[in-house]
Image (spheres, rainbow, N blue to C red):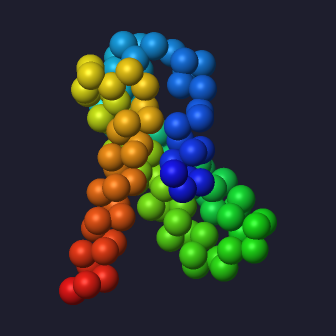
Amino acid sequence: MPPLGVALTTLDWEAIGTREAQRHRQLVIADSPELTERELVKYNGFAAAFADGLGRRGVEADTCILAAQAGLAVFRTAYRRWLDEADHEDIAAPVRAALAELRALVTAVSAS
C-alpha cells in the first residue's frame, strides 16, 4: 500500500468517535452552511499539512500540492463510504478501493 494508504488506514478512527456518532456529525454539518464551510477549511488544512510533509522529504512543490489534493479526495471518498456502508469493519477497505479507483482513473486519463 502506498504511504497515503498507510497513513489513512493507521489513523486512530476510534478516537474520533463511533461510526454512528460520525454519521450524526456529518448530518449536522450537512444541514449547516457555516459548519460545511468550516469542514472544508479543515480539509484544506489536512491537505496543506500533507503537502508540507512531502515537501520536507524533498518532493517538488507542485507535486506536493497535487498529491495532497489527491490524498484529500481519497480520504473523503473512503470516509464517506465507511460511514455509508455497514459492511466495512474499519476504513482500510474503503481506502484501498478509493486508491485503486484513483489509480485506474489516472491510468485511463494518461492513455487518452
Above or below, comparing residue 112 to residue 81 in the picture:
below
Residue 30 located left or right of residue 12 = left
> Residue furthest toward the front?
1
In-image side of 73 versus 10 (left or right): left
In this orientation, which residue lies closer to the viewer: 45 or 91? Answer: 91
Residue at 41% x, 43% y is 95
The furthest residue to the bottom? 112
Q: Is residue 3 visible?
A: yes
Kindly tell me whether residue 44 is visible in this rendering.
Answer: no
**Towards the viewer: 52 or 58:** 58
Where does the image place residue 64, in percent across and percent down from the top left? 60, 70
Viewer-side residue, 40 vs 95: 95
Residue at image point 37% right, 36% down: 93
Coordinates of residue 72 in the picture (x, y in percent): 47, 52
Is residue 45 placed above or below 79 in the rendered structure? below
> Residue at (78%, 66%) from the top-left corner?
56
State the quadrant of the C terminus.
bottom left
Q: Is residue 12 left or right of residue 104?
A: right
Query: Which quadrant of the view contains residue 30?
Result: top left
Residue at left offset 48%, top offset 55%: 71
On screen, 106 above or below 87? below
91 above or below 53?
above
Tell me where residue 1 appears, x and y as whole percent. Answer: 51, 51
Q: How many marks?
A: 0
Location of residue 109 by image quarter: bottom left
